[in-house]
Amino acid sequence: MIIITNNAKMMEETGNSIEKEYIDGTHKDVLIAVRDRIHKGHRLLTHPLSGSVKPNQTPFKSVAISKVPEKLDLDSLDIIEKSIRTYEQFEKIPTDNGKANNERILNDYREIDYKLLESALISANRRG
């Protein structure tokens, strides 16, 4: 598994046992990086729009994909393309989403993103 993220907390807290790719960019940049990996044959392991936080409400996003590329997974491609379009629609709705650089608020958004992915990974491990 590879985690693609723009969340520094995800990079720090998940340890070295999980491969990670840090995107120095926006939530949308993460989605685009995931889409690029899917084009290379990786598969989504977590949904890019997980949780009840709207894409324009958080600056941080982490998505898990398969480690080994195979053939193009059309379901993953469809999901990521729809997720990018959804992000673009929400992007038009004005929101601060931590851009005021209030570090406490940004840390809350980092924690939410981290917990969402952590929960998905725990659930996936239970299934097996």
Image (spheres, rainbow, N blue to C red):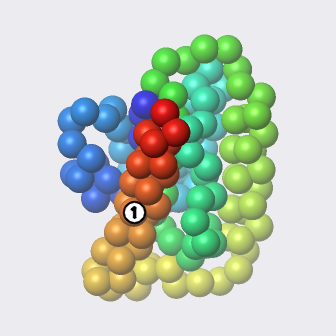
| Label 1: element kind | helix
Can residue 118 be seen here? The reply is yes
Q: How many marks?
A: 1
Q: Is residue 18 left or right of residue 28?
A: left
Can residue 33 be seen here? The reply is no
Provide the residue designation for mark 1.
Answer: 115
Relative height, residue 69 to residue 3 (above, below): above
**Could you tell me which quadrant the N terminus lies in?**
top left
Relative height, residue 27 to residue 103 (above, below): above
Relative height, residue 66 to residue 50 (above, below): above
Q: Quadrant of residue 51?
A: bottom right
Depth check, front residue: 14 or 55: 14
Measured as percent of width and height from the top left, residue 36 is found at 60, 32
Measured as percent of width and height from the top left, residue 3 is found at 42, 40
Measured as percent of width and height from the top left, residue 66 is found at 51, 28
Say which amino acid is labelled 1: Lys
